[in-house]
Image: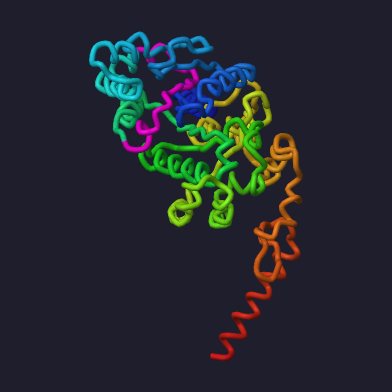
Amino acid sequence: RGRSAPQHALSTREAMPFAQLVIGPPGAGKTTYCAAMAAYLAARGRDVVIVNLDPANEQPPYECAVDIAALITVDDASSEYGLGPNGGLVFCFEYLAANSDWLVEQLRPLAGKFVIFDCPGQIELYTHHEAVRAVTDALLKTLDYRLVAVHLMDAHHCSEVAKYVSGLVVSLSAMLMLELPHINVLSKVDLAESAGELAMPLSFYTDCCDLERLLPFCEDTPAFSAKHAALTGRLCELVEDFGLLHFIPCCVTDNETLSQVAAAADKACGYAFGALERNNHGIFETVSGIAGWEYDRVNAVADRYTGHSENRYESRNEFRHENSTPLDGSDADALARHYHEELLSELGAEEAV
């Protein structure tokens, strides 16, 4: 009897429906990510399916377990109501929210499978519109789904300050609007420098800290961005005040980066603590796969795809303090000396008072 209770608890956890809700702006690589992540998880023994919730994606490059096209498409909305592509997408999701029982019934036969939802690239659906929130609420309340939102941002935005900061604001807005367990992914990291050399190390863009250090580079951007550098600075302060953002770099052809995203998503939705993979011996082995130094993992990705060592940033005067002490963490001894000197100066000021 003492052994049957844990087994029952384990089977209950395995019956929980877990899913990734893949969201993000158009062109971020959501559909490609869904196909790659599904293949990665399936190769490791997970029973995974993809649900297409993008009414504009009429020929997805994967097999759909459920397709919103069976309910409505953008062409239907456009021909019936004379809507454009953007208005048609919003209408389609509003229609899905109003008929969420259709989606619920389509998902019931998928019980026990890990689901990846491929969502449309209309950012207002995630930042301030209620339709996606209504659909996720239906899944949570009716089918008891354990959802994690996976928000993708194209890594090439890192090459321009204004685009990068705008992407951060969109990611933050989606987090606050959906109120789901959430991870942010820097997609297409292999193309991060396709639009030019990054001004800062890749780890800077994934950590989203000390963003004001990007402001001097507004001068190198188009005239509009340079003119509104002050606005960019205020947005940087807003993002840092919340302190919620962090990105995981990902290349869909790199299984190592896919494994990092999958581990973070599994931890966020609870899959890592409940449903165990076939080849795992226990929950602690599952969770132990999440551990590791994030800084080292990001640097390894940077070495593969940015083509430069992070030491190249040490020599840049823009990243040095007034006393020429590098404050980007690249020289630990210099950083320690800087803060030691600051501490001594503060103590001296207190004694003087």
Give the tally of numbered discs. Answer: 0
Q: Nearer the viewer, residue 325 or 296?
A: 325
Q: Position of residue 225 (x, y in %)?
A: 49, 48
Name which quarter of the figure residue 127 lies in.
top left
Q: Position of residue 22 (x, y in %)?
A: 47, 27
The stretch drawn in magenta includes residue 109: yes
The stretch drawn in magenta includes residue 43: no
Would you place residue 294 above or below residue 351 in this image?
A: above
Would you place residue 156 above or below residue 244 in this image?
A: above
- Colour scheme of the rendered structure: rainbow
Residue projecting furthest to the front: 223
Q: Residue at x 50, y 27 (%)?
A: 27
Q: Position of residue 284 (x, y in %)?
A: 62, 36
Q: Magenta segment range?
A: 106-128
Would you place residue 294 above or below residue 77 in this image?
A: below
| Residue 125 left/right relative to 321 | left
